[in-house]
Amino acid sequence: MNIDQTEDCSLKINRARSESQTQLLLLPDGRVLAHNLTPAMAEVLQQLDPENLLIQQRCQPVSVKQPSQSAPPPKARRP
Amino acid sequence: MIVADISPKPVLAGRCQIAARRAVRARDSLAHCQLCAHLCGANRLGGERGPCRAGKVARFFSAQTEVADELGLVPTFAVALSGCDLRCDFCITGRESWNPGAGLEFGARNMAARALRALEQGARTIMVLGGEPTIHLPDVLEFVGALPDSAKLVWKTNAHGSPQARELLDSMFDIWVADFKFGNDSCAQRLAKVGNYLEVVQENLAWANANSALIVRHLLMPGHIDCCWRPIAAWLASRLPEVEVSMRAGFWPGWHSGRHQELTRSTTESEISRARDIARDFRLHLIE
């Protein structure tokens, strides 16, 4: 099998994300890509772009409490 | 597009006990590992490493409630295990997915407790992903064994598992979310360094469709609409015409994408539009 192992770090990295995290990528054309989107960050994105249906859909079902979330501060959530 | 309305097929009664028994079998099998389609036979219990580089204990790099997956699944408590049997240059979690030593030791019982708390707090499902979770089936089955049968479990996979993995996974998860990344073996070899991709993935998708609720996920890659998405759409229309298809448009040019000129950007609106036209032409059952 031809598999590239030169980039395959075998060192143990003894850390995992201790707090919830979302990564955002802002594209030059104005699109925003989100990875590991948490409920709290979905709410933030909805406030930035209230007409965005994709984000709306991901905010509506959420009633999850995430006490470990560092930012943004807790807000009222839709049921 | 429509919102996913997933109807999970019933899992086995007494799933947790069965999973616990299978976990023992899966752990023993690491002496001659054949969990993924590489069938490398590495003795992971004895310290050997196969292409995935994984040892005998799983580690995880993320465990949190998320809402970016298909609407029928979210909010989901997503547990991402380190390490993978593929080497996709565009992997959005390449640092952890290419390194099974990344993150922290998994600990099935502790993670199950966290997952149950997430369910109590509003998560609808529990998703196991990677990297690629297939290479960590012993720990995954211990995790399933520590969860109640009523928990809705989602198996997120690259669909590059072996027949042995399928046997161990049978009826353990309510829903499979399986990637169909490449529409031909040449792109698979060039971008993920994997051979015989189509045959393996198509076999796994057909099996998953017959044995579980299935969502087939495809990440549109820039410059790969005609060589990858079109043949995938054609195959799905022909072989799995009823399956729910999640076409993801948010290609993120990270990790080693820069090794490939066409992957140094995201997909354009024009490409996304053309991909939707292809899906419509093949009458695919697209979900969001």
Image (cartoon, coloured by chain):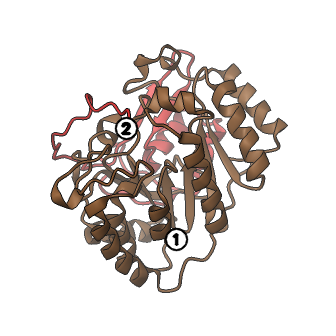
Q: Marks 1 and 2, how far apart in space?
A: 27 Å
Judged left or right of residue B17, residue B234 is right
- Circle 1 — which element? loop
Residue type at tag 2: Thr
Q: Earlier in the sequence, mark 1 or mark 2?
A: 2
Label ID, residue B224: none
The residue at the point 76 percent across, 37 percent down is: B279
Q: Which residue is mark 1?
A: B170
Residue B272 coordinates in the image, percent (x, y): 68, 27
Which chain shows up in red? A
Looking at the image, residue B198 lies above or below residue B214: above
Q: Residues within 10 Å of mark 2 (few under 14, many from 20)?
A: some
- Chain brown in the figure, letter: B
Q: Chain of mark 2?
A: B
Write down the residue under mark 2: B93
**Residue B181, position in %: x, y?**
56, 38
Q: Nearer the viewer, residue A57 or B109?
A: B109
Tell me the quarter of the picture where residue B215 sits.
Answer: bottom right
Please tell me whether mark 2 sits on a helix, a strand or a loop: loop
Based on the displayed image, in which of its 4 quarters is residue B219 positioned? Answer: top right
The front one of B79 and B170 is B170
**Is A5 placed left or right of A10 in the picture?**
right
Question: Do callouts 1 and 2 point to residues on the same chain?
Answer: yes
